[in-house]
Image (spheres, helix red, strand yellow):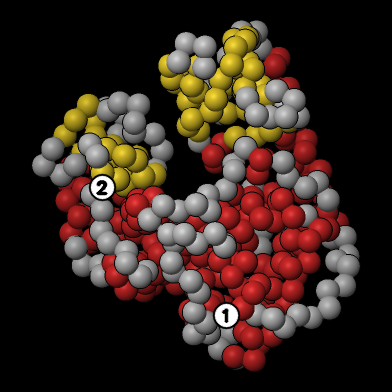
Amino acid sequence: MKVNSVWQQVDGILNTIDFEKLWKGFKRYRFALYDDEKVYFGERVIEIDNRFRGNTSIDYDGEKIAIWNVTEEDLHSIEVLACNIVHEMFHAFQLDNEEKRFPNDIKGLDKPLEVEYYGMKKREAGLLVESLATRDERIKSSNLIKIVSLRDKRSKLWKTATEYEFRIETVEGAAEYVGTIALKAIDDERYKERITTYSQIIMDNERLFDTRRYSYFYGALLLILLDSMNIQFPEDIKDNPKTIMEELLSTISQRVQIERVAIDPAIEEEMTRYIKDLFDRFDKFHASHRKNHLGRYNIIGYDPMNMYKREKEILHERWVLLHDCDKDQPISIEGPVITVYNEDESQIVDYIT
């Protein structure tokens, strides 16, 4: 795979995009592609180092840039790859605008284990998918009021978990929305395919329990629905404490009565499977000979897509970056590794390798 050639192709596609049309004030940022050995900036190539992990935005030489770990799968569509990089550029834009609504991913691992919570999410998903598929404005309007009513009730019953979703939708869902709108401008057929795929994802019972990934897709589709209804949503990032859904809850005052959601046996079965899988991951880790590293640590970097929590332990399957408070130095640890928190979860007191 000639990554530099891929970089040139992506660069050419990005040159065709009007970033300001995607989101007010949005602009293009520098980007880098990397593989296991090298980082490619176009004309410049450097050796890889620990700054390049995952697909995200990082500070590099005094500026924020988008980075992407190129795989063979990415080569199936350079257009999709370019739009995924737009997603990461949007994170650079958020950081430049002092985004304050980032979710607490550690607290977000404390998921409700009540079937009704996921039943309400599934109902919200069905309403959103139906709204995206119809041209009937009355159905769109009616469904949006139902979505808002469901989310209003859910946020009262499960405040912390629901607010975590709202924050992911605001930060990651907005970035996914921007990337998806960019794809529409580049390749309308692939855009339609993406909408279909994302609609299928949010209706999948298994995906309901993958809160972070799920919220990427739900958040993006919700903004696309608002676009289709000509409903303005706030694009100001700096000094904006409200999530997009909180703004919507304020803007749309009408509510409908939400009856108790009946227990869905299929969702209940999926929740049982999810809990078993969670315990199996930890049991498998602890079944091997391990080494403890007692001390005082703070978490400063992690892969949010591959973390699992059981009581005071968090399993990082890929990697984690800690700050050793006693030695005042960072520690990069390849996974699988477990971090162990103190009683109030304010500090890591051990990590297990």
Q: Position of residue 180 (x, y in %)?
A: 41, 65
Label 1 Cα crowd, 10 Å radius (few <14 / some 14-19 / many 20+): few
Q: Position of residue 68 (x, y in %)?
A: 34, 43
Residue visible at 75% across and 25% down? Answer: 343
Q: Nearer the viewer, residue 218 or 76?
A: 218
The amino acid beneath tag 2 is Phe
Q: Is residue 61 visible?
A: yes
Reading the image, the residue beneath label 2 is 31
Residue found at the very far left of the displayed protein = 43
Q: Earlier in the sequence, mark 2 or mark 1?
A: 2
Q: Is residue 266 visible?
A: no
Reading the image, the residue beneath label 1 is 133
Label 2 Cα crowd, 10 Å radius (few <14 / some 14-19 / many 20+): many
Q: Secondary structure at mark 2?
A: strand
* Distance between mark 2 and mark 1 Cα atoms: 35 Å
In the rendered structure, the answer to whether residue 26 lies left or right of residue 299 reads left
In the rendered structure, the answer to whether residue 139 lies left or right of residue 26 reads right
Residue visible at 36% across and 45% down? Answer: 57
Vertical arrangement, residue 168 with respect to residue 134, above or below: above
The quadrant of the picture occupied by the C terminus is top right
Residue found at the very far front of the displayed protein = 239
Q: Position of residue 133 (x, y in %)?
A: 57, 80
Residue visible at 56% across and 66% down? Answer: 244
